Image: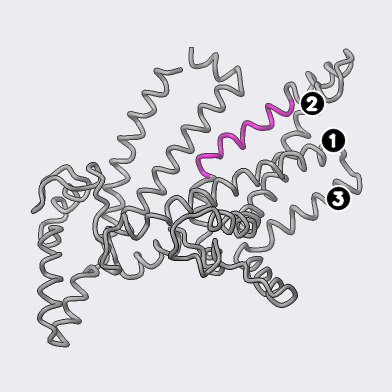
Amino acid sequence: MIVQILRRLVTMALTLLVISALVFVIIKLPPGDYLTNRIMELRATGDAGSVAKAELLISQYGLDRPVWQQYLMWIGAMPGPAGFSGLLQGDWGWSFEYDKPVAEVVGDALWLTLLINITAVIFVHVVAIPAAIYSATHRHTFGDAVVTLLGYVGLAVPGFLLALILLFYTNRYFGLSIGGLYDSALTNQPWTWTKVRSLLAHLIVPTLVIGLGGTAAMIRRMRANLLDELAKPYTVTARAKGLPPLRALLKYPFRMSLNPFVADIGNLLPHLVSGSVLVSLVLSLPTVGPLLLDALRSQDQFMAGFILMFVAALTLVGMLISDVTLVWLDPRIRMGLR
C-alpha cells in the first residue's frame, strides 16, 4: 500500500506540472495583462512615476520575455532577475491589482476556504447518510416521503438564492446580520478566543447553504444504491439465516453503497469551492472564490494562476484520500492491488 501511495504522489506531481502549464497558457490567451493595460491608462494620464513602477514590475517578473520563459520563471524552474523564485520556492507571485504579494492577499482566505468546505463535507455526510439509510429502510412511508421532498427542494433551490432568503429574513425578523465569517468589528483584529467564537457562530449559515445541494444529491443517490444492495441475494440470505437486521444492513449493503460517494470525494472538494463563489459574494465570505473572480476579470495573472493551482491540488489530494479510503472500505480493491 505504501508503494502504491508513493507512486500516486509521483503521478500527482507530474499531473500538477501539466496542469500548471495549461493554466498559464489559458491565462495568457487573452491579449494584454493587468500591467500592460495599466501602463496604457497611466501613459494616457501622463503619470510618469506610476508608469516607471509598472514597467519595473514588468521587468522584475519577466512579462517582457517569451511566454515559455515566463512560465518557467513562474514555477521556479528558471532564474529571473531575482534568481530562482517561483511556486517551487514558495513565491506565489505578485498581485498587481492589490499591489501586494499573492501570499498576503490570499493568506487568511486559503485556510478559511478549507475550513468552510471541510465543514460542508462533514455536514453533507453526517446528514445525508442517516437520512438515506432511514429512507431506504422505510420505503413508501411518510418519513420516506418527507426525506424525498427535502431532497428535491435541496436540489432545486440554488445556494445563492437560499443565502439571500436567509439574509433577508434573519435581518427582518431577528435583526441579525449573518454575512461574513465574524463580526465586522473583528475584521482587522488578531485572532483571539472572541474572534474564534464569532467565526464558529457565523460558520453555521455558510455550511448549511453550501452543503445543502450536496446533501440532497447524496441522499437520492445513496438511497437508490442501498435499495439495490438490499434486494441482492446475499442480503436476503443473511436475513434468512437470522443475522440481526442492523448487522445485516451495516455489514455489507451499507459499505457497498458507500463506494460511489467515497470515489466522489476528489470531485466534491473542488466542486464546493467553485460552486460557492456566488454564495461567498452574497454572504460576503472572505474565501478564494471572490478573489479568483476578481483576478480573472482584471487579468491579474499570478493571483488567478495560484488559486487555480490550489483548486487543482485540492482535487488531487481529494482523489488520493478517496482511493485510500476505497482500498480500506472494499476488500475487492485490496485484493486487486496485490
Distance (Cα) linking label 2 and label 1: 9 Å
Q: Secondary structure at mark 2?
A: helix
The amino acid on which the numbered mark 2 sits, given as a three-letter code, is Leu
The residue that disc 3 covers is 145
Task: Depth check: give the residue in front, 145 or 79.
Answer: 79
> Which of marks 3 and 1 precedes in the sequence?
1
The amino acid on which the numbered mark 3 sits, given as a three-letter code, is Ala
> Which of marks 1 and 2 precedes in the sequence?
1
Q: Residues in magenta?
A: 253-267
The residue that disc 1 covers is 137
**For mark 2, does the 10 Å Cα neighbourhood hold few (<14), some (14 to 19), or many (20 or more) residues?**
many
Distance (Cα) linking label 3 and label 2: 21 Å
Residue 262, given in percent of the width and then of the height, sits at: 59, 34
Task: Depth check: give the residue in front, 71 or 289.
Answer: 289
The amino acid on which the numbered mark 1 sits, given as a three-letter code, is Thr
**For mark 1, does the 10 Å Cα neighbourhood hold few (<14), some (14 to 19), or many (20 or more) residues?**
some
> Which of marks 2 and 3 precedes in the sequence?
3
Is residue 310 part of the magenta span, yes or no? no
Determine which of the numbered discs, if any, sits on residue 249 in the image. 2
